């Protein structure tokens, strides 16, 4: 398997964090512009460990206040945008968004805004790639039809999370 060094830029409130990582060269090129389900799975499986490695630095480089309310930042959302189709300078841009809690109304609002931004920037019709909120599976995951801010791989996971998701979903729907 051939590997190539690729730049990862984390866009934080207090500037950009830049790192280089070697990734499978099969993720580079024209296929990344219009990815199929297999490619998306491989892409997310490749970048999740990279994002996890730099999560603490992203949290430190983010603002101390949630992007949606006045509460203190507790977690950051990391939303990758692939530019791996660029032959001259492929890279991955990761939007880092501070929020007050995971799974709450502020996260839902932030994910909705990220989705709109990614569609405007032209990263594809699907915008942000999301794994199933319950089990983390990418293959077959589909967005909640109401809020479009979370994904589930099937009805079982959606039902399992409904009591937690319902209040935030309805709040996001009313904004």
Image (cartoon, rainbow, N blue to C red):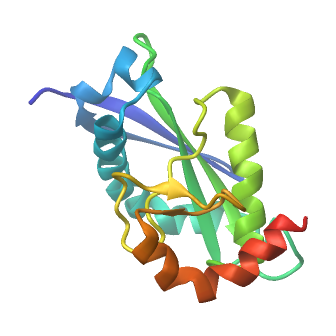
- Residue at 67% from the left image edge and 38% from the top image edge: 118
Q: Residue furthest left?
A: 1
Q: Nearer the viewer, residue 32 or 23?
A: 32
- Along the line of sight, the residue nearer the viewer: 19 or 141: 141
Q: Is residue 175 left or right of residue 86?
A: right
Q: Residue furthest bottom?
A: 163
Residue 123 to residue 116: above or below:
above
Query: Does residue 172 appear anywhere in the picture?
Result: yes
Q: Nearer the viewer, residue 21 or 86?
A: 86
Residue at the (89%, 78%) spot, across then down:
70
Check the image and report above or below for 88 versus 110: above
Q: Position of residue 158 (x, y in %)?
A: 50, 74
Image quadrant of residue 143? Answer: bottom right
Q: Residue 85: where, in percent of width, then height?
A: 43, 19
Residue 17 position in % (x across, y down): 56, 47
Which one is in front, 155 or 78?
Answer: 155
Is residue 65 visible in this depiction of the protein? no
């Amino acid at each position: 398997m051939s590997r190539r060094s690729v730049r990862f830029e984390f866009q934080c409130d207090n500037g950009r964090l830049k790192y280089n990582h070697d990734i499978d060269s099969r993720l580079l090129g024209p296929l990344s512009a219009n990815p199929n389900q297999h490619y998306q799975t491989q892409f997310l499986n490749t970048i999740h460990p990279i994002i996890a490695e730099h999560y603490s630095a992203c949290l430190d480089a983010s603002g101390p206040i949630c992007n949606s309310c006045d509460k203190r930042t507790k977690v950051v959302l990391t939303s990758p945008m692939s530019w791996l189709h660029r032959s001259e300078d492929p890279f991955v841009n990761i939007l880092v968004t501070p929020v007050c809690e995971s799974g709450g109304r502020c996260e839902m609002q932030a994910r909705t805004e990220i989705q709109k931004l990614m569609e405007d920037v032209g990263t594809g019709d699907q915008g942000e790639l999301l794994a199933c909120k319950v089990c983390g599976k990418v293959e077959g995951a589909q967005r909640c039809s109401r809020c479009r801010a979370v994904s589930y791989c099937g009805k079982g996971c959606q039902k399992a999370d409904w009591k937690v998701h319902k209040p935030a979903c309805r709040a996001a729907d009313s904004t």
